[in-house]
Amino acid sequence: MKIIVVGAGKVGTTLIENFVKEGHDVVVVDLDEKTVNYVVNRLDANGVVGSGLERQTLSDAGVESADFLIASTSRDELNILCCVLAKKLGVKRTIARVRDPQLFSEIDSMREYLGLDLAFNPELQTALEISQVLKFPSAKSVDTFADGKALMVEFDIGASNPICGKTLMQISATYGYKLLFCMIIRGDKVFIPRGDFTVMENDVVYIIAKESELAAFCKSLKIFKPRAKSVFIIGGGKIGYYLSKELLKDGVSVKILESDKPRCEELSAALMDATVLYGDGTDQTILDEEGLKNSDGCVTLTGIDEENVIISLYAQQKGVDKIITKVDRSSISDMVKKLGLETVVSPRNVIANRIIMFVRAAQTEFSDKIDALYILNDKAEALQFTVGEDFEHADVPLSQLKIKKDVLIGGIVRDGEYIFPSGDAAIRQRDKVIVVTTLKQINGLSDIFKAGAYKSK
């Protein structure tokens, strides 16, 4: 597919990098010539220097024959107008980055009028991801399927963990919960494991199950942490605002520490039930006086990665149960994890999942299209499909289907209930099916089956 990305900032560059990996023909448009040259030389994309609001610039980028135009500049209004112009010039689909809370809340009602196929908000999406982790803080990361009916959680396995040295079959026999170990990372290798796979120290495991099963399992392992009831947020930017709204809605006590006084006033007016504090997040005295150590969770969201890391390390020293660190630069993410800060979030990666999912869904002819996608460690993917009416393997037990190597069905959600993918379970029309795979370009559910998908009886 031909994709034009207008704006080569952090989010735009991440999208370009992922689209190139998926084999798409990508053109970047940006006002800054150095930025365009950097992206073209580093990421093997094409480039045009100019404004996304200029007809000639978009024409030079090939908008008339493009499948997608994604406007990801720092200005919401420019992104929307760029998409309107591109649609009139012939692009098939448009996607705009819209960050302003008021504008984003109204964009759905204007999308059809504007010819806008999707609006994305990295800050809101990041806040929602953080809130999920705070609801299940035992895990490093939490991804949800079917509106939370199934969770995929990530754990590090230490030497003292009771499952260390056991096979998946032994774990199942010992604990008895309906859990699916869907992926295990060991060093640089990624495994879609079978029952005889042995979990080892320093493995990173991904498990899919209902929240109640996961909670019971964590209690058995003595690693369970209850939902956060009080959260200290350092940084009152857009992510902090969206996260506070989400937490307050769930009855969580929220403190926000923000270093810009006018922004403090804005937050105080918009978030009446939150405690908004004016001060520097790196000031140890303020953190101590305001009771950081008594909080269940600490989320560092300043605009400087290094500050976020330092504050998170201090919160760790103070014994805060759950610490979440925002890191924008991918180059330091791995280093941060080695410091013991296990939960690291990056807005650019969060939104890349959503945009890639939307593009994949648009390019497939299957009716069973993707409606959720998570890229795991850049080497595997977890996807959710809603089963279409023409799905040819409906009502066939999973044990009778030939599924491709390195593909695992992680579960079925039917009528709001998670169904463990045992051999006698069957996929039905309108089910939601979770798939984990190391294969690339899985666009529809039918892609996971081998030719002649039924096993001989």
Image: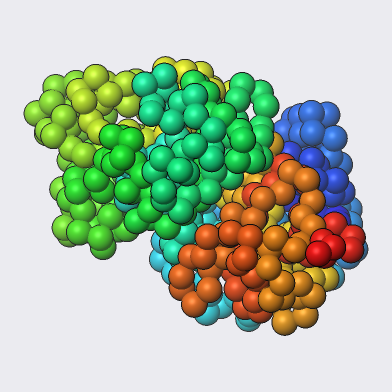
| Residue 439: percent from left, percent from top | 77, 45
| Residue 33 sits in quarter | top right
Where 437 sits versus 372, above or below?
above
| Residue 137: percent from left, percent from top | 33, 42
289 left or right, relative to 36: left
| Residue 104: percent from left, percent from top | 48, 65
User: For the point 32% across and 48% down, which residue is it?
Assistant: 216
111 left or right, relative to 368: left
99 left or right, relative to 285: right
User: For the point 21% across and 53% down, which residue is it?
Assistant: 252
User: For the point 53% across and 68% down, which residue is it?
Assistant: 413
Give the image's coloring scheme: rainbow
User: For the point 69% across and 76% down, which residue is it?
Assistant: 395
Where 271 sits versus 344, above or below?
below
| Residue 220: percent from left, percent from top | 31, 40
Question: Toward the viewer: 174 or 232?
Answer: 174
Q: In the displayed image of the protein, which residue is found farthest to the front? A: 457
Q: In the displayed image of the protein, which residue is found farthest to the left? A: 289
Question: Toward the viewer: 6 or 93?
Answer: 93
Q: Can residue 329 be seen in this view?
A: no
Which corner quadrant holds the N terminus? bottom right
